[in-house]
Image (cartoon, grey):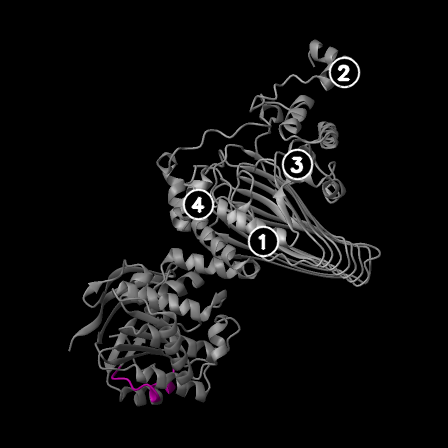
Amino acid sequence: MAQEEVKKAISGEYKLGFEIDIEQDTVPPGLNEDVIRFISAKKNEPEWMTNLRLKAYNIWKNMEEPHWAKVEYEPIDYQAISYFSAPKKPPSSLDEVDPKILEAYEKLGIPLEEQKALQGIAVDAVVDSVSVKTTFREELQKHGIIFCSISEAIRDYPELVQKYMFSVVPMNDNFFAALNSAVFTDGTFVYIPKGVRCPMELSTYFRINAINTGQFERTLIIADEGSYVSYNEGCSAPMRDENQLHAAVVELIALKDAEIKYSTIQNWYPGDETGKGGIYNFVTKRGLCEGENSKISWTQVETGSAITWKYPSCILKGDNSVGEFYSVAVTTLAQQADTGTKMIHLGKNTSSTIISKGISAMKGQNTYRGLVKIGANAKGARNYSECDSLLIGSECGAHTFPYLEDKNALGQIEHEATTTKISEEQLFYLRQRGINEEDAVSMIVHGFCKEVFSQLPMEYAVEARALLNLTLEGSVG
Amino acid sequence: MSKILEIKNLKAKIGNKEILKGLNLDLEEGKVHAIMGPNGAGKSTLSKAIVGHFDVEVTDGEILYKGKNIVDWEPEERALEGIFLSFQHPVEIPGVNNAYFLRTAVNAKRKHEGKEELNAAEFLRKMRSLANELGLKPELLNRSLNEGFSGGEKKRNEVLQMMMLEPNLVILDEIDSGLDIDALRAVSEGINKMKDGKRSFLVITHYSRILDYIKPDYIHVLKDGKIVKTAGAELVKELEEKGYSEFEEK
């Protein structure tokens, strides 16, 4: 530490100093308390939130970045990142967008107006989805459902946020969660009141706040007693994004008899054949089945990012609660994914299902890492796990690390794992029927993922299939 | 009589082993040709060579299909041009719906032929009616392709695909292996129905039983990588009595 800084630290000047002009729309790279105060001020946050962020920052400062996952990457310089920057000027028309991205949109069948929205291009008032959003909001309000940005929620629903934020993923949970707690810029908040069945799929596409919140996203979903909600995050289209490091946190809380279904399609930029330029995605997702008979179901289709570090988990606290994890993770090019789940059984007769499908092609490395823990009081707990890996080509890899901890002799755990190569006989069979090689591979891969895709809401499943084809295009032969 | 397939001096190996050693064979349009021969003679290698299976490397000679040498063609090109192989051991493909697969194949072929795709209703009607004729249980149409099918069900499913794809040259590799009498009858009735005077059949078999059901016009004896005798259907009797040892290389 430089002399000057030591002096500042001792005098307390550093802590209290507020040297960044709030009128600025960006802060210089680096992370300190000023930056956090700046972010909090920019968001018009109440003091309690500012203080929580500062607390998280001080926890994070003393934590070490974890390196137990089976992924390799250049060290991240956290002081070289700008933690608040106004989005760069979007392109003024699609002509200025990378033709490769447009080609992907074309293949995924994304309508023109939606393409523009994804690239941050202003859309004509007539076709803007504002009206859609308005109708949508009115419909939700009728049921008392709150669906807004997390910033709005912090201002407008402080009791709910104070009660539930950090209750499932504490700020000291892990390095990336602590970082997110300190610097999160935006995200989504959902509250479903008692006994309400949310009448539509909630998806980020309809979200009211800006699209460019991907870097340190924070999501909090609360399903009150007897309610139901299905939430879709992300989309298959590549989105404009200038930030390499992503560290999101998602917390779900299901009270008695409530059910939350959370689906994700993740397609961040994977980098080139050497992995250069791709997104690092370090995500903490966790759901708490707080009440009896509650249920949380995670479904994810992960095709993007250079590095994926992600373990959507369930804490099955309520008796008879149910946790599910359905995952398809694809790694191609030089992508590395270390993903899986944790199912923590605390309540009686809790049950969990894990279906994980890893697909590796080219130089992709795919790791499943999962923990099933059955606590001493979790009488009658059951788990079924199935982890299958599919290899395409000979340079890729698949790895499985299942961890089991059973403190209750009455628990019942079943685990199955397979690793298969796309068989030449299967490919040949399809080709002999006139189906070209690429379509044949896609057919076999889709067959492999079927159990997971069938969990996705229909439109989302269609998107996921198209995305999978696009991702694996050219990875054979 | 025009020839649908002319194989000239075909040499092919599997791994380092030469299996076909200068094989010559002509197939006539609209006729049923049977290839018979002892185990290890090269019967399956011949069928694999015709469809372009990855196991087989053609080292010399030509395979002329409708007058064109197809030795370097991709398997799907051969299929789209009308060559169909009923596999001896159809592979199981988990998660791939049988009907969906068949519809994809049918439409790929129609597209190749410049025809419109069959719509879902037309396709389903045709598939169900043919499956019914073959005695293929309807629920198998909605199962994963060949997964958990019995031997007989797999072969019925092969013949269903053949009937839907309407190929010009049908290769039946040991179609009767593992079939009971009922299945054999259903399968061969399906095949016989497809005889239209234009379509050609190559029936590859170790035993003569299938030839009681699918009447051949010609019999070829394959031994040690070559066709050693070609004759009419009457040769079956002779083979039954004397076996294959009679036929030495010329």
Percent x, y of residue B116: 28, 66
Please identify the quarter of the rendering in which residue A122 is found. Answer: top left
Type of residue at label 2?
Gly
Label number found at residue A139: 1
Q: Is residue A477 left or right of residue A255?
A: left
Residue drawn where x is 47% and y is 57% of the image? A462
Q: Residues within 10 Å of mark 3 (few under 14, many from 20)?
A: few
User: Is disc 1 in the same subunit as disc 2?
Assistant: yes
Which quadrant of the rendered structure holds the N terminus of chain B?
Answer: bottom left
Which quadrant of the rendered structure holds the C terminus of chain B?
Answer: bottom left
Type of residue at label 3?
His
In the foreground, B145 or A346: A346
Please identify the quarter of the rendering in which residue A53 is found. Answer: top right
Percent x, y of residue A475: 43, 48
Q: Nearer the viewer, mark 3 or mark 2?
A: 2
Which of pointers 4 and 2 lies earlier in the amino acid sequence? 2
Extent of the magenta region: B207-218
Which of pointers 3 and 4 lies earlier in the amino acid sequence? 3
Q: Which residue occupies the extreme left position in the image?
A: B1
User: Is disc 3 in the same subunit as disc 2?
Assistant: yes
Q: Cα distance, mark 4 to mark 1?
A: 23 Å
Residue drawn where x is 38% and y is 65% of the image? B104
Q: Which residue is mark 2?
A: A12
A85 inside magenta stretch: no
Which of pointers 1 and 2 lies earlier in the amino acid sequence? 2
In the foreground, B176 or B205: B176
Q: Residues within 10 Å of mark 1 (few under 14, many from 20)?
A: some
Percent x, y of residue A316: 75, 54
Q: Which residue is mark 4?
A: A114
Type of residue at label 1?
Glu
